[in-house]
Image (cartoon, grey):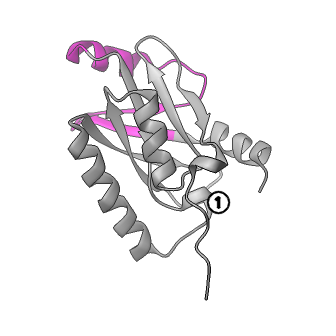
Amino acid sequence: MTRAELEAIYRRAAYRVQLEEDLAVDLVVGARCPGLDQWLSSRGARSWGFLTAVNPGSRRLAEEENRIRLARLVGRLRESGCELRAGVGLDPAGEWPPEPSFLVVGASAEALAAWAAEFDQAAFLVGTLGGPPQLVFVEPAAQAPPARSV
């Protein structure tokens, strides 16, 4: 799939975040989210990212492999000390399965890019208080090379 095709898919997706037990918001690339802004303000936070470790490069993996990758990502994110909130990437057409993800509060764009590259993700979201979510593609050279079969 080309980058343009992936970008169109990622821009159509909704990125749902469970901020509190009774508060969820949907993030859409390019559209401000007042609910997220209010929640961030209440914490004194200014920056955030949204990423996953599953289905690297938009290639479907087995459920067990995705669970392992997600557990590794959780470990890396917790090591960072950033606040996490569970999320899910949703395909509005229902053609792609929901992808468990995380809102990472307080992470720099550089840290988010490094984590996305570490887990072979094609892209991630980044944002700041008052601004819309932005789609950031991971440069192919930053991603791990494909595994070779022997």
Lateral position of residue 64 relative to residue 140, left or right = left
Residue 146: horizontal and vertical position, in percent? 61, 68
Front one among 139 and 102: 139
> Is residue 18 placed above or below 141 in the rendered structure?
above
Residue pointed to by mark 1? 95
Q: Which residues are magenta?
A: 15-44
Q: Residue at x 40, y 35 (%)?
A: 111
Instruction: Tell me the quadrant of the picture where the C terminus can be found.
Output: bottom right
Residue 137: horizontal and vertical position, in percent? 62, 39
Front one among 97 and 82: 82
* Crowdedness near tag 1: few (<14), some (14–19) or many (≥20) residues, C-alpha within 10 Å: few
Observer able to see residue 79: yes
Front one among 77 and 130: 77
Residue 20: horizontal and vertical position, in percent? 23, 34
The quarter of the picture where residue 145 lies is bottom right
Instruction: Tell me the quadrant of the picture where the N terminus can be found.
Output: bottom right
Q: Residue at x 31, y 26 (%)?
A: 106
Q: Residue at x 39, y 76 (%)?
A: 64
Type of amino acid at the residue the image marks with label 1: Glu
Q: Was residue 112 drawn as part of the magenta stretch in this picture?
A: no
> Is residue 26 placed above or below 86 in the rendered structure?
above
Residue 124: horizontal and vertical position, in percent? 53, 40
> Is residue 74 placed above or below 37 in the rendered structure?
below
> Is residue 1 placed above or below 40 in the rendered structure?
below
Residue furthest to the bottom in view is: 150
